[in-house]
Amino acid sequence: MADGRIELGKARILVSNDDGIGSPGIKLLEEIARELSPDIWVVAPEQEQSAASHSLTTRRPLRMSEVAERRYAVDGTPTDCVMLAVKHLLRDRRPHLVLSGINAGGNVGEDLTYSGTVAAAMEATLLDIPAIALSQHFIDGDPIPWETAERFAPEIIRRLTELPWPEHTLINVNFPADTMENIRGVAVTSQGKRAIADNLTKRFDPRGRPYYWIGPVREDGVAEPGTDLAAINQKQVSVTPIYLNLTNIPVLASLKKVFG
């Protein structure tokens, strides 16, 4: 880095995700990363880990296998992958940037608390490495418009890394579910909040015993302007800074008055 900025041409970039090492999204992100720097490493889960959140494997050993040159699969979570890459595989020269994705499906609003894609970027941030999570929205039943992410991701990454990187902050990028010619630019947004419809279904197996299925999030109402949700609905690429210090400062001050 120079003055807190990342020199992409000289940077070591780690690519990870939650959809798994064989997913089309991580292959696209690896191709994009190779356009930016020659020093690219991929460490991702063996199997899909969607909605794994920021979980860490602590009750069993982890295994990491080399599937190709500078490409490794881990039988664990996205958080495991970033930790193994930074603290073991690349310990002699840490990554300058972590790219997570490109996720098949959006990560906006409350999704961030569940997302393994965002969790990989979160782990990098906790390890003091700049990180960007990238997700491509799509409509069920339609082809995933990967060309939209392919078109916009390189320039967004370049612009972000030209800025001094903010402390304790990851950048969450979401591409709308439309073809690139219909995208209406880039919006810098805050994290939104949805009015979530019921997505829990109760059913019965052939023996009459109940089971439950958590389905995709269904939204009610209108997204608040300026949020990631509103941007995606308006066919804009959403760029959201996510701060990892979760302390509510105004409440902290009031609690100090109560407890002294």
Image (cartoon, grey):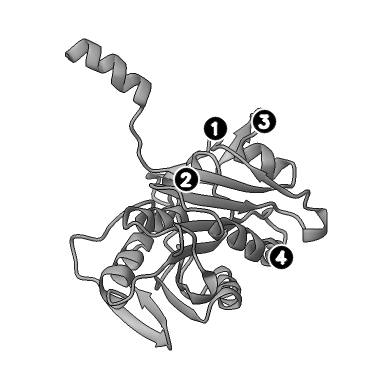
Above or below, 260 against 33 in this view is: above
In this rendering, position of residue 161 left or right of residue 178: left
Q: Name the residue under label 2.
A: 112
Mark 4 to mark 3 CA distance (whole Å) = 25 Å
**Nearest to N terminus: mark 1 or mark 3:** 1
Dot 3 lies on which element?
Answer: loop
Question: What number of labels is visible?
Answer: 4
Residue that label 1 marks: 193
Task: Please give the name of the residue rendered at 77% of the width and 52% of the height, measured from the top-left corner.
Answer: 183
Q: What residue type is labelled 4?
A: Arg
Please name the residue that numbered disc 3 is placed on.
225
Q: Does residue 211 appear to the left or right of 151 in the view shown?
A: left
- Taking depth in this image into account, of 200 and 24 the one nearest to the observer is 24
Question: Which mark is on residue 151?
Answer: 4
**Label whose residue precedes the other's in the sequence (1 or 4):** 4
Q: Quick one: which residue is furthest to the front in this view? A: 3
Tell me the SS state at disc 4.
helix
Whether residue 48 sits left or right of residue 175 in the image: it is left
Amino acid tagged 3: Pro
